[in-house]
Image: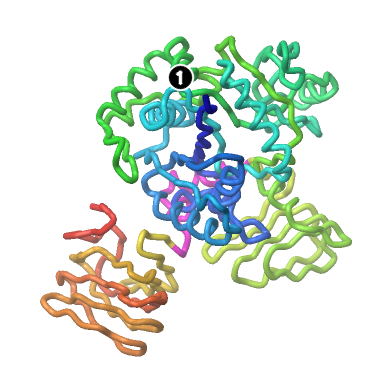
């Protein structure tokens, strides 16, 4: 009898507020591009796809991030060396709102049981961690899958290299019979203070909790039944209202919102008895702050690290990331400087964990910078706000080949479109026509309209909006290929 399926499950839901202003609510941490050009999400997908015998990779993410995630996957898999079995199948479970890892894991287990059977081995992985040692990762997954098929709930324990206070820890007990490289779990430990972290490092049997778990669908559902029965009952009710054959599988909003916002650690792992931890050295990095991300760039002779264009004079041990502008620093030390088109962060390296508080302040003030970049991604492409002021806004719009915006109308604004590159098919009221490079059209307020790209190259145009109100919520959709309302 063949072994049960190994199903990697990518959990992609965190906001990554400590990496603002690059990480934002509508373009969060998993989409951050690293110095090699790949995003954390793409690296996680390719890590899962490289595992032996993996043919399907399930992703649990927010509905609003679905199309961006699909684009990331298509780009990553297209650049991947051809594999004889072809690219993996990549189904999605779409959450209407975030509810932490326990609900996501429960619904992933219900999905796996429905589609692949209760003995399916789930490999739960965060989408926003970096693992440098792929060979060690594959070896650890193989051992974890063996233990999972013996009814263990398995977690990865990363061998600590420093008395880190930003991670939770796992205390390992005695080795498991027949598995000298795996241990029973004595307990999970919250993020410690510096003294206790130093004690854990010296003790030698404490490991960083990487948030990577392996278990069968049946074992997790049984553990939920024992330790979080209300969560399981609610998840099963949601699954009963879900169409499991849909592509993607969308979870209903109203009952999903009633699920507890709780992690898998709190709901199950801290209470279960059949736990196992595998100590491992994966080159793991959770990229949990700007300090961690800065370490990925090579230092100069003064300890400075830069991504983008920077000019440094009499500056030491400073990180600069600039996407579009030249950033100059003179006579400073130990700083993090991150420049984006609409926001700049300057922080001392000792205070990068506090960046998340800035995001909270922005959110409380209703400032769009916590949520949006200047460039906003849509299912059909993207737009970038170039300039705005009283009664006007100027955007650069890029539409993917074959894509189209919704058939829509605005109450308060008119729009003037000028094609820069490509060909646009325009519906403007009752008329439909093609407009080419250097041609334009005017859409008056109250007029039903649609923009399409019928060509094979990206369509780029400049949109000039004028009117009393230019908010993104002034839109009435009559028809949309992407199911938006």
Q: Mark 1: few, some, or many residues within 10 Å (few <14, many ≥20)?
A: many
In this rendering, is residue 9 above or below 72? above
The residue located at (81%, 25%) in the rendering is 201
In this view, the residue in front, 159 or 259, is 159
Task: Spot the residue most to the left.
Answer: 430
Q: Which residues are magenta?
A: 354-375
In this rendering, is residue 287 above or below 322? above
Q: In x, y percent, where is residue 144?
A: 63, 26
Task: Spot the residue most to the bottom.
Answer: 438
Q: In x, y percent, where is residue 16?
A: 55, 44
The residue located at (67%, 67%) in the rendering is 308
Task: Spot the residue most to the right.
Answer: 301
Q: Is residue 342 left or right of residue 353?
A: left
The quarter holding residue 272 reads top right
Q: In x, y percent, where is residue 188?
A: 64, 18
Disc 1 is placed on an element classified as helix
**Magenta: predominant secondary structure element?**
helix
Q: Is residue 22 left or right of residue 239?
A: right
Q: In x, y percent, where is residue 122?
A: 52, 30
Q: Which residue is mark 1?
A: 218
Residue 34 is inside the magenta segment:
no
The residue located at (46%, 40%) in the rendering is 58
Q: How many marks?
A: 1
The quarter holding residue 271 reads top right
């Amino acid at each position: 009898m063949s072994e049960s399926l190994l199903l990697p499950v990518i959990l992609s839901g965190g906001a990554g507020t400590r990496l603002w202003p690059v990480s934002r609510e509508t373009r969060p941490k998993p989409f951050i591009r690293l110095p090699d050009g790949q995003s954390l999400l793409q690296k996680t997908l390719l890590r899962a796809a490289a595992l032996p015998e993996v043919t399907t990779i399930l992703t649990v993410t927010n509905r609003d991030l679905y199309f961006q995630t699909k684009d990331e996957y298509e780009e990553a898999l297209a650049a991947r060396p051809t594999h004889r079995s072809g690219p993996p199948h990549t189904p999605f479970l779409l959450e209407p709102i975030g509810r932490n890892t326990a609900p996501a894991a429960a619904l992933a287990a219900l999905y796996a049981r429905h589609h692949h059977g209760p003995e399916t081995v789930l490999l739960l992985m965060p989408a926003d961690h970096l693992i440098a040692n792929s060979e060690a990762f594959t070896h650890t997954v193989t051992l974890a899958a063996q233990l999972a098929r013996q009814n263990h709930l398995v977690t990865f324990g990363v061998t600590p290299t420093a008395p880190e206070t930003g991670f939770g820890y796992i205390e390992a007990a005695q080795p498991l019979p027949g598995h000298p490289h795996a241990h029973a779990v004595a307990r999970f430990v919250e993020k410690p203070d510096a003294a206790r972290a130093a004690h854990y490092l010296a003790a030698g049997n404490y490991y960083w909790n990487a948030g990577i778990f392996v278990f069968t669908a049946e074992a997790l559902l049984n553990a939920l039944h024992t330790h979080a029965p209300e969560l399981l009952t609610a998840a099963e009710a949601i699954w009963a209202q879900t169409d499991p054959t849909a592509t993607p599988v969308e979870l209903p909003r109203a009952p999903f919102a009633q699920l507890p916002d709780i992690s898998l650690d709190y709901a199950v792992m801290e209470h279960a008895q059949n736990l196992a931890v595998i100590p491992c050295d994966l080159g793991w990095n959770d990229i949990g702050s700007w300090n961690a991300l800065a370490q990925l760039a090579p230092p100069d002779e003064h300890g400075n690290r830069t991504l983008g264009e920077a000019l440094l004079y009499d500056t030491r041990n400073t990180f600069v990331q600039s996407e579009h502008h030249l950033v100059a620093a003179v006579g400073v030390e130990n700083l993090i400087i991150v420049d984006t088109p609409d926001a700049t962060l300057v922080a001392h390296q000792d205070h990068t964990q506090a960046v998340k508080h800035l995001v909270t302040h922005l959110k409380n003030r209703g400032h769009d910078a916590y949520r949006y970049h200047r460039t906003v991604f849509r299912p059909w492409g993207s737009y970038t706000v170039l300039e705005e002021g009283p009664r006007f806004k100027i955007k650069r719009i890029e539409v993917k080949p074959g894509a189209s915006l919704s058939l829509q109308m605005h109450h308060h604004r008119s729009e003037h479109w000028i094609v820069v590159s490509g060909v646009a098919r325009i519906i403007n009221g009752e008329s439909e026509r093609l407009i080419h490079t250097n041609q334009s059209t005017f859409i008056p307020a109250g007029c039903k309209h649609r923009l399409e790209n019928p060509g094979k190259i990206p369509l780029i145009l400049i949109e000039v909006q004028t009117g009393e109100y230019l908010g993104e919520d002034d839109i009435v959709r009559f028809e949309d290929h992407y199911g938006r309302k």
